[in-house]
């Protein structure tokens, strides 16, 4: 049945998008265009099913989940249909806001800990803070729920008044809190601090309409013109709003420089250029990327790379070089449809080929009109054919399977919570020592988790960093813990060393340099 419904509602997709702008044919008259004829064919089939199928057909489910999403799947992985709830979330993301309580939580079966509360959020106003343990939500005991049930409960609670039972650090009796959801700013610049003397660090998790302003304000707070360098971390930034990427590029590039060109079958060619931004920063730039840096983030990175404005370091990016146009449909739903492909200032496409889709050969048109070689403004060659290749390759360190298991199970956070219960709060100078590691090993033993000797020895430094980070998270907040973890990040350390080499590495025809992790 599912296959027949999907095929049927491919026609209903056309109805929802097209019939409102096409005049209906008079009764008995044959329509004179192909789309309307196909719509009528599917409509007749759907009417037959509705009248004769043995059970009533849930039309909304069939249209949303079966027909429309099924039709889009055959096109490419980026086109998508949004039901009313999803479309509302998308709109909130675009403006950098979300509805909820402004709380970052650590969630494991039977345990929910507060890691951070946003400034001015319902959670912060209620007095919740790092290390608080939520033991009940609207009367449901956390300890009695499996992980999926717990996640579902927390997600449902975001949109309505929530009554929480909370045990504060060092206490054994819970206190009651009542929180009312509100719109919370969801900043795209989620980390900003001094990484080293006169070197600023920003991590961007997305590009939304507020991102350029957030970048400018963060750089000014870190010192603005007095900074001697800025490390922009775009790892795991999956993109966002294209205009925001152009505006962000304008903060670092001279006005009237090409950022990208957009071309599509049904859309006119359009060029995006930098403009005279309210602030522009000429400081040395290093941009860190990885395999999940994508879409609008790649637009931003390619513009800085091809205008020789920043040293791009890290690992090759994802390779998403197409544009989705989002349209609001009836019944508060929305449609994101791939309508164009974008090209970097040098003319290259960074869309990686996707077999079995319309993007199986994204460079087909490019080969007929352009040279297969591409260069930056100063003449440095740049690779094409999928993603952005960094100027300097810095590989992320490979973690052994045992450490990955500890992270996935949340065991560092669980140990930190137990440690604080037994030893009380730590101070800001606390550094785990051998005694702390033995306590951690004993904690693992009590949970029947073996510490293999082949991993325990080589992982000592990493174990200490993770334990220290989680303790700091629970005592001083997630922001302080993230600074600690960032400074201990191998890729960050290597990137920091390159600020003195930027000029040499950005010279024309400079060879790529590979830096292996220590």
Image (cartoon, helix red, strand yellow):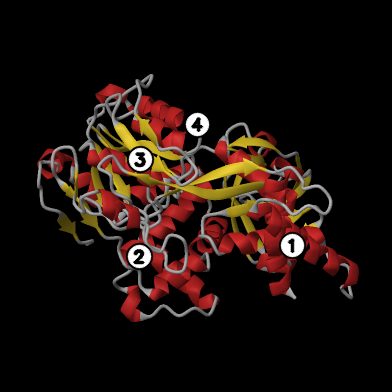
Contact, mark 1 vs mark 3 (Cβ under 8 Å): no
Image disc number at residue 210:
4
- Looking at the rendered image, the quarter that the C terminus falls into is bottom left
Q: Is residue 144 visible?
A: yes
Q: Residue at x 40, y 30 (%)?
A: 247
Q: How far, Cα to Cα, is label 4 from label 3? A: 15 Å
Which residue, given by chain and number where applicable, does mark 2 sit on?
434
Instruction: Give the number of the mark in front: 1 or 3.
Output: 1
Q: Which of label 2 and label 1 is nearer to you? A: 1
**Secondary structure state at the residue bearing disc 3:** helix
Rendering quarter of residue 246: top left
- Alpha-carbon span between mark 2 and mark 3: 45 Å
Q: Secondary structure at mark 1?
A: helix
Against 174, residue 49 (above or below) is below
Q: Are marks 4 and 1 in contact (CB under 8 Å)?
A: no
Gap between marks 1 and 3 measured at Cα: 45 Å
In this rendering, position of residue 83 left or right of residue 228: right
Mark nearer the N terminus (4 vs 1): 1
Q: Residue furthest front?
A: 29
- Could you tell me how many numbered marks the image carries? 4
């Amino acid at each position: 049945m599912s296959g027949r419904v999907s095929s049927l509602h491919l026609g209903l997709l056309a109805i929802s998008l097209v019939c409102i702008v096409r005049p209906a044919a008079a009764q008995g008259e044959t329509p004179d265009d192909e789309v309307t004829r196909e719509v009528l064919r599917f409509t007749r089939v759907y009417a037959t099913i509705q009248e004769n199928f043995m059970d009533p057909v849930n039309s909304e489910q069939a249209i949303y989940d079966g027909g429309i999403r099924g039709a889009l799947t055959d096109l490419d992985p980026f086109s998508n249909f949004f039901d009313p709830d999803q479309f509302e979330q998308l709109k909130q993301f675009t403006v950098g806001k979300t509805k909820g309580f402004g709380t970052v939580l650590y969630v494991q079966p039977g345990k929910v800990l507060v890691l951070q509360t946003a400034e001015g959020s319902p959670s912060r106003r209620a007095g919740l803070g790092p290390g608080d343990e939520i033991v009940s939500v609207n009367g449901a005991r956390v300890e009695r729920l499996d992980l999926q049930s717990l996640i579902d409960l927390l997600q449902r609670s975001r949109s309505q008044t929530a009554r929480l039972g909370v045990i504060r650090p060092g206490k054994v009796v819970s206190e009651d809190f009542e929180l009312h959801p509100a719109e919370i700013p969801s900043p795209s610049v989620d980390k900003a601090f001094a990484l080293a003397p006169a070197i600023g660090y920003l991590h961007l998790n997305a590009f939304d309409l507020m991102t350029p302003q957030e970048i400018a304000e963060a750089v000014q707070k870190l010192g603005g013109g007095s900074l001697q360098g800025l490390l922009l971390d775009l790892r795991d930034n999956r993109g966002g709003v294209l205009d925001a990427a152009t505006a962000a590029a304008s903060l670092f590039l001279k006005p009237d420089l090409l950022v990208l060109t957009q071309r599509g079958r049904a859309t006119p060619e359009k060029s995006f250029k930098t403009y005279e931004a309210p602030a522009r920063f000429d400081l040395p730039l290093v941009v860190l990327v990885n395999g999940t840096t994508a879409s609008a983030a790649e637009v931003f990175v390619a513009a800085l790379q091809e205008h020789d404005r920043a040293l791009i370091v890290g690992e090759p990016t994802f390779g998403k070089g197409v544009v989705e146009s989002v349209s609001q449909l009836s019944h508060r739903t929305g449609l994101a449809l791939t309508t164009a492909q974008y090209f970097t200032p040098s003319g290259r496409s960074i869309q990686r080929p996707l077999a079995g889709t319309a993007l199986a050969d994204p460079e087909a048109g490019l080969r007929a009109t352009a040279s297969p070689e591409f260069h930056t403004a100063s003449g440095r060659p740049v690779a094409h054919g999928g993603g952005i290749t960094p100027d300097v390759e810095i590989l992320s360190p490979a973690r052994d399977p045992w450490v990955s298991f500890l992270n996935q199970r949340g065991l560092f956070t669980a140990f930190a919570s137990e440690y604080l219960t037994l030893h009380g709060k730590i101070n800001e100078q606390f550094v785990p020592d051998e005694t702390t590691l033995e306590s951690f090993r004993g904690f693992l033993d009590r949970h029947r988790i073996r510490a293999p000797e082949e991993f325990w020895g080589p992982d000592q430094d990493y174990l200490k960093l993770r334990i220290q980070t989680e303790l700091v998270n629970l005592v001083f907040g997630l922001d302080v813990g993230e600074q600690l973890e960032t400074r201990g990040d191998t890729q960050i350390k290597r990137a920091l060393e390159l600020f003195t080499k930027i000029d040499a590495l950005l010279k024309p025809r400079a060879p790529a340099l590979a830096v292996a992790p220590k």
